[in-house]
Amino acid sequence: MHNGHTDLVERASVLFDKVVLGIATSPHKSPGELELRVNLARKALSHVKNSEVIGFNSLTVAFAREIGATVILKGIRTVTDFDYEFQMLNMNRALEPEIETIFLAPSEENSYISSSLVRQIAGYGGDITKFVHPAIADALESKKII
């Protein structure tokens, strides 16, 4: 989770009564890592009082239905992001037509940040503190998360 994600949750917290950041399991990561990622996200978002962080292991649209969400909010940085997310929107709509997907562009200062770039910088020992919450920087630098 980087500052672009934090920015989206902060801005969404003004638009919605409650914002749930769902963190999905990854087949490439250990099961214990999901719990760590959820805890780190909770630290990064502790100042957003109407937000909650929940880990899940299902389709995103199924998770949204399970928690009673009516909207899935997606951050879109590039045309490539839009292309992929628009395809996902239509698939989710086919599965759960009552759940809407809304796209939100990042703030200008976060428009170039991506998780893969942050991981790459951290992997080479670069300074990532301006891109992520301090707890996340510590975890990446100590290689607790990838």
Image: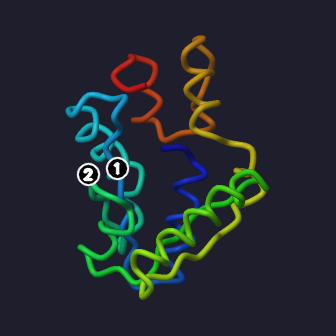
Look at label 1 and name its amino acid. Answer: Ala
Measured as percent of width and height from the top left, residue 3 is found at 57, 48
Image quadrant occupied by the C terminus: top left
Residue 45 vs residue 117, the one in the foreground: 117
Element type where label 2 sits in the image = loop
Residue located 45% across and 19% down the image: 141
Look at label 2 and name its amino acid. Answer: Asn
- Structure colour scheme: rainbow
Residue, disc 1: 24
Element type where label 1 sits in the image = strand
Q: Is residue 84 left or right of residue 9?
A: right
Q: Quadrant of residue 115?
A: top right
Q: Is residue 133 left or right of residue 118?
A: left
- Packing grade of label 2 (10 A; few <14, some 14-19, many >=20) is few
Residue, disc 2: 57
Extreme residue toward the front, this view: 94
Measured as percent of width and height from the top left, residue 49 is found at 36, 71
Distance from label 1 to label 2 (Cα)?
Answer: 6 Å
Q: So how many labels did they put on this image?
A: 2
Residue located 26% across and 28% down the image: 30
Residue located 42% across and 88% down the image: 98
Q: Quadrant of residue 82?
A: bottom right
Residue 120 vs residue 139, the one in the foreground: 120
